[in-house]
Image (cartoon, rainbow, N blue to C red):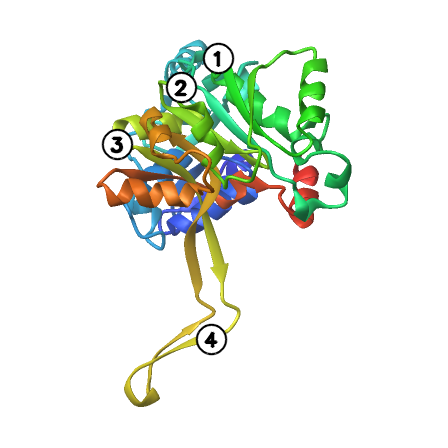
Amino acid sequence: MIAKIQSRAIQYSTSILDALKKMDAEKCKLLFVFEKELFKSILTIGDIQRAIIKAVDLSSPVSCIVDLNKIFASDVENLDSIKEKMRRLRAECMPVVDKNGNLVDVIFWKDTFSDNPDLETREKIDLPVVIMAGGKGTRLKPITNVIPKPLIPIGDKTILEEIMDQFENIGCNQFYMSVNYKSDMMRFYLDQLEHKYSIEFFEETKPLGTIGSVSLLKGKINTPFFVSNCDIMIDQDYRDVYDYHVQNKNDLTIVTAVKSIRIPYGVIDTGDDGLMTGLREKPEITYMINTGVYLLNPELIEEIPEGEFFHITHLMEKVKARGGRVGCFPVSEGSWRDMGEWPEYLKMIKVL
């Protein structure tokens, strides 16, 4: 096996969940799949996301979902031909195989080109972004006694700038910011930046829940729009979320994270008369967690009551009750970083 991909190699029999965990551990979005020593294909995060959306059991082997018809390069092709193929496909890497299908080399985009394949060549979208930044950040006291949570530093920037930069990179230019606590400080800080974001502030004079203040935007947004909490980062191109939202004709799409919890004990199943019916040793349970990022159709703003305390979960229930579509776009657990509490914030700044 080629040494430079050894840490990213998995077997055909590896479970989908274990493949997702390996991506998180290696901080990558692509793995190389082998059946013993025989190279089969590559597995991308997109393959796994599509499988989750189709409700494929995550304990299933990756052989159930891996695409065996992906385009690779031949060992008789010259480098210019391979580079052209990579640009056309926006491929993070290009496996090079011989006539027998053996993997002889892998050419990575980052080692060959200076740009980012998706940011440079993929069509951008210009959708409004609403950032919910009005909370008091009580779980991050005492630092939030001094500065509002969105202005807490993450490296050389604030968490707010990191979030906005990510959306700007895919073409989103209009931001709406729901503010309340220490809003003057946020306005002042953003005004001092050399890079001027296009921001319209709107203020809730009383707590209105996780989505209630968006009722103040009635008549201002007429396209699908993103809503993001101000304390999370997700390593995901949000254009994929938009494509999923449109293709599935969703009213509302939630970005969800795959969260696995291992029970550190043997779990016993019982039936009538307390008789044991089964025993599972340290089972692992997988959930889909709400990350705090959403994509909404503009008509939903009309369904948010004005001046009332209203959570995003209330809106989801309202949409479901009338027969609307609430979709879930999955990301890996490691792709989602939450700084809402001290342990998570400290973990986040170590990551960045």
**Few, some or many residues within 10 Å of mark 4 (<14, 14–19, 20+):** few
**Few, some or many residues within 10 Å of mark 3 (<14, 14–19, 20+):** few
Give the label, 1 or 2, closer to the camera.
2
Tell me the CA gap for discs 3 and 1.
26 Å
Marks 1 and 3: in contact by CB < 8 Å?
Answer: no
**Residue 13 placement (x, y as % from top left):** 36, 52
In the image, is residue 223 above or below residue 61? Answer: above
What kind of residue is marked 3?
Answer: Asn
Quarter of the C terminus within the rendering? top right
Give the label, 3 or 1, closer to the camera.
3
Marks 2 and 4: in contact by CB < 8 Å?
Answer: no
Q: Which mark is residue 120?
A: 1
What kind of residue is marked 1?
Answer: Glu
Query: In the image, what residue occupies the spot 36% across and 35% down?
Result: 253
Q: Is residue 179 left or right of 188 when viewed as pictured? A: left
In depth, the one of 107 and 57 nearer the eye is: 57
Q: Secondary structure at mark 3?
A: loop
Q: Which mark is residue 221?
A: 2
**Few, some or many residues within 10 Å of mark 2 (<14, 14–19, 20+):** some
Tell me the CA gap for discs 3 and 4.
40 Å
**Residue 330 placement (x, y as % from top left):** 40, 40
Label whose residue precedes the other's in the sequence (3 or 1): 1
Label whose residue precedes the other's in the sequence (4 or 1): 1
Marks 3 and 2: in contact by CB < 8 Å?
Answer: no
Query: In the image, what residue occupies the spot 65% across and 47% down?
Result: 341
Q: Which mark is residue 266?
A: 4
Q: Quadrant of residue 278?
A: bottom left
